[in-house]
Image: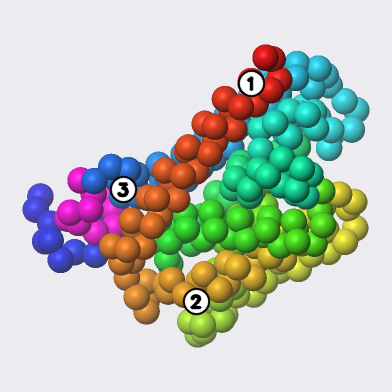
Amino acid sequence: MLISVSERRCPFCGLISPAAGWRRIAPLRLFADPALLLKMVIGANIAMFVVSLLLDPRSFGLSANPLRLLSPSDQSVLVLGATGTIPIDRFQRWWTLLSANYLHGGVLHIFFNMAAFRQLGVLVIQEYGPSRMFLIFTLGGVAGFLVSYLAGVQLTIGASAGVCGLVGAVLYYGRSRGGTYGSAVYKQVGMWAIVMFVFGLIVPGINNWGHGGGLVAGALLGFGLGYHERKRETSFQKTLAAGCLVVTAAVLCWAVVSGIYYRFL
């Protein structure tokens, strides 16, 4: 079955811009398959979590406290790229603003973050596109951790800063689009934001600065990048997303190599 080169989305498989020439350029091909992109981000988070456990086998111990179940040691997450004033001010590890988005403090921590990412990621891809989704997640996470660093947070990890970036983008979309659908999206995701805010006030150790910074950054990115109904993804945005992907992969590889070096050598 032939598809016109002007088709925005394949009517059979749902592929966005199926005839686009940029799909022939690696690593831009990854953004041609939104489902694969989501799996890649989740897989990278799981892989980094497993590595953080393996760096310190003592963290495999079971705990009666579910929040401490399979929790990597502080030393493991520090050498793998936790961010904050300690790694940045003492060791000048600015790259941890990116790597911290792929580290987690326990099995429940990563489970809830990845569940939220999976659900929000689908919505953001639908309304913004896969390239802009990855940009919002990545830059929203960096912005959130930068805010928490400026606020004096010593050590922090978790994809929730990037997830809050997605929340901010969806809130902007719902508010900007309006109408029945836009209002419904805004109210539903707005409740998520309220729950996260209240949860952060009640539970100790939550990086509220990172959440707030990520949310605001996500809203600003949503405004600046635009969504499908106002502006299609541009070649520049796709190239920028590919650049973020390459830098992220390089940073995570460096984090694993340096983590193994500092832990065992």
Q: With 178 as the anchor, is 152 left or right in this view?
A: right
Q: Position of residue 262 (x, y in %)?
A: 69, 23
Picture residue at 57% right of the left edge, 25% below the top: 257
Give the Cα separation between the discs numbered 2 and 1: 40 Å
- Tell me the amino acid under the disc marked 1: Ile
Where's residue 218, x and y in %? 58, 67
In the image, is 68 to the left or to the right of 19? Answer: right
Q: Assess disc 1: are there few (<14), some (14-19) or many (≥20) residues with their C-alpha within 10 Å of its C-alpha.
A: some
Mark 3: secondary structure: helix
Q: How is the image coloured?
A: rainbow
Between the residue at mark 2 and the residue at mark 3, the CA separation in whole angstroms equals 23 Å
Q: Which residue is mark 2?
A: 223
Q: Position of residue 254 (x, y in %)?
A: 54, 32
Q: Tell me if 208 is positioned left or right of 158 in this view.
A: right
**Which span is picked out in magenta?**
13-24
Three-letter residue code for mark 3: Leu
Q: What element does badge 2 sit on?
A: helix
Which residue appears farthest toward the left when viewing the image? 2
Give the side of residue 184 with respect to residue 53, left or right: left
Nearer to the camera, 29 or 182: 29
Give the SS element for disc 1: helix
Does label 2 or label 3 sit earlier along the sequence?
3
Which mark is first along the chain, 1 or 2?
2
Q: Is residue 221 magenta?
A: no
Is residue 86 visible from the viewing direction of this image? yes
Q: Is residue 186 above or below residue 94?
A: below
Specify which label sits upstream in the sequence, 3 or 1.
3
14 in magenta: yes
Q: Nearer the viewer, mark 3 or mark 1?
A: 1
* Residue at the disc numbered 3: 28
**Front residue of 79 and 6:** 79
Secondary structure mostly seen in the magenta stretch: loop
